[in-house]
Image (cartoon, grey):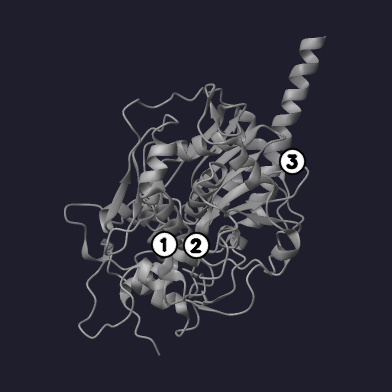
Amino acid sequence: MKRMSAWAMALTLVLGGNAVAQQTKPLSAQDSDPNTLGWMQGFPPAADKTIRFTDPDYFAFPKLRWTVCHFRELMPTVAVDNGSKGARQLAVTLDPSLDAVSFTPLGTNKAMTWAQAFDANYTDGVIVLHHGRVVYERYAGCLHQNTLHGAMSVTKSLTGLIGEVLVAEGKLNPAALVGDLIPELKKSAFGDATVRQVMDMTTALDYSEDYADPEAEVWTYAEAGSPLPKPKDYVGPRSYFEFLQTVKKSGTHGKAFAYKTINSDALGWLIARATGHSVAEVLAERIWSRIGTDREAFYTVDSIGTPFAGGGFNATLRDMARVGQLMLDSGKLNGEQIVPKAAIDAIRHGGDVKKFEAAGYELLPNWRYSSMWWVSGNDHEAYAARGVHGQTIWIDPKADMVIARFASHPVAANAGSDPTSLPAFQAVAEHLMASDAASSSAQKQ
């Protein structure tokens, strides 16, 4: 059995392990509010209210409801510069009627309102943009308008976006073999995979993220990414780069979608090799400093400062909404093409339904996975960036709507919140479209 450090056990929770496995009925959103529970309050905080990076449960529910807003205090990070131009103000026209929007969660026949869904999903904050204007904004728990919150696997979608930008600009060949671009990976499972297979996660990797299995490779991966000193007898990989070189192949690349975080780290390495800069630097230069973000963002890093391209990004909720609006507007902001339209088109129209089906996501029929974005295939052509515990950027082109949400749901997997979230997003979109239609009709009379 592999020896699992406190860091390894904790990081697997960030990657998606079930942080509430031992609780049959978790505390409610109100009862688990970090302010109510008193985590890290006082100077110093009480011993039983202290959360440390080295605690194996530092990211387990209910502690995670505090931790999601405080990664920078707990571990080493690298900044994503937002430049010196200052924040771009978001127009605000709040629509109080959204709270009463009703929908029926999947698998039930009992209606719920948008307002009720806030606590049902342990939401820390949610913002809705319609035609580029803020029509709804609400915060709770550890989150405020200017707080940096963990984006979890929404990070992957940012990595995928950067990858598509480089493809559109001819700086990264999607048909190239990874081993030809990164010789260090030639003998690994990634060696004979194409860049596109990495971006769409159709690689065939002998790698398990089964957190119930103490022998699963995810534990070695987590230990490799730890910035903490290793035991004297430790002989495993000591960075994300080193771990990727150890991954073995199982099967044939390109046959089926399999969601595995290490693909994002491989793409992060490809981005770094193609540009000569880390994903944090590329994101800052190409996007973050150009879209009028409120704050500098950051990534968590490993022991050599490598940004965690699969889950380490942290930002404000409004800035995540700005990313969503950039996607919705085909990469253009105030007349300037920040991101090539071709990059966003590739995300929206990429992926393969048949390959996605192989992964067995029962709640996501007809979906696809494209450049580390989730494409719904619904009649609104909605697509999303998604992360554990409820992190979301939802983009609905037909409704001209963006929803950004940060959350700290006790169940890590999106299956815990999707039954409530997916119909709620659709209901809000339809409500906004109906309001547009009514307004247009009134103007014609």
Q: Which residue is mark 1?
A: 62
Task: Residue lying at the far right in this picture: please name it.
Answer: 445
Visible residue check, residue 411: no
Query: In the rendered structure, which disc, 1 or 2, sits on the residue that comes first in sequence?
Result: 1
Q: Quadrant of the C terminus?
A: top right
Q: Is residue 338 left or right of residue 150?
A: right
What residue do we see at 46% from left, 36% from top?
318
Q: Amino acid at mark 3?
A: His
Q: Which residue is mark 3?
A: 380
Question: Disc number at residue 153?
Answer: none
Asked if disc 1 and disc 2 are in contact, CB closer than 8 Å, the reply is: yes
Q: CA distance from mark 1 to mark 3?
A: 36 Å
Q: Amino acid at mark 2?
A: Pro
Visible residue check, residue 161: yes
Task: Residue lying at the far front in this picture: please name it.
Answer: 180
Task: Residue lying at the far bottom in this picture: please name it.
Answer: 1
Residue 149 position, x and y percent, is: 40, 48
Q: Which residue is mark 2?
A: 410
Query: In the rendered structure, which disc, 2 or 3, sits on the residue that comes first in sequence?
Result: 3
Q: Secondary structure at mark 2?
A: loop
Where residue 67 sits, quadrant-wise, is bottom left
Give neighbour class at mark 1: few <14, some 14-19, many 20+ (Cα, 10 Å): many
The one nearer the camera, 54 or 336, is: 336
Residue 310 position, x and y percent, is: 46, 59
What residue do we see at 38% from left, 32% from top?
294
Where residue 170 sits, quadrant-wise, is top right
Asked if disc 2 and disc 3 are in contact, CB closer than 8 Å, the reply is: no
Q: Nearer the viewer, mark 1 or mark 3?
A: 3
Q: Is residue 374 left or right of residue 389?
A: right
Q: Quadrant of the N terminus?
A: bottom left
Residue 162 position, x and y percent, is: 49, 46
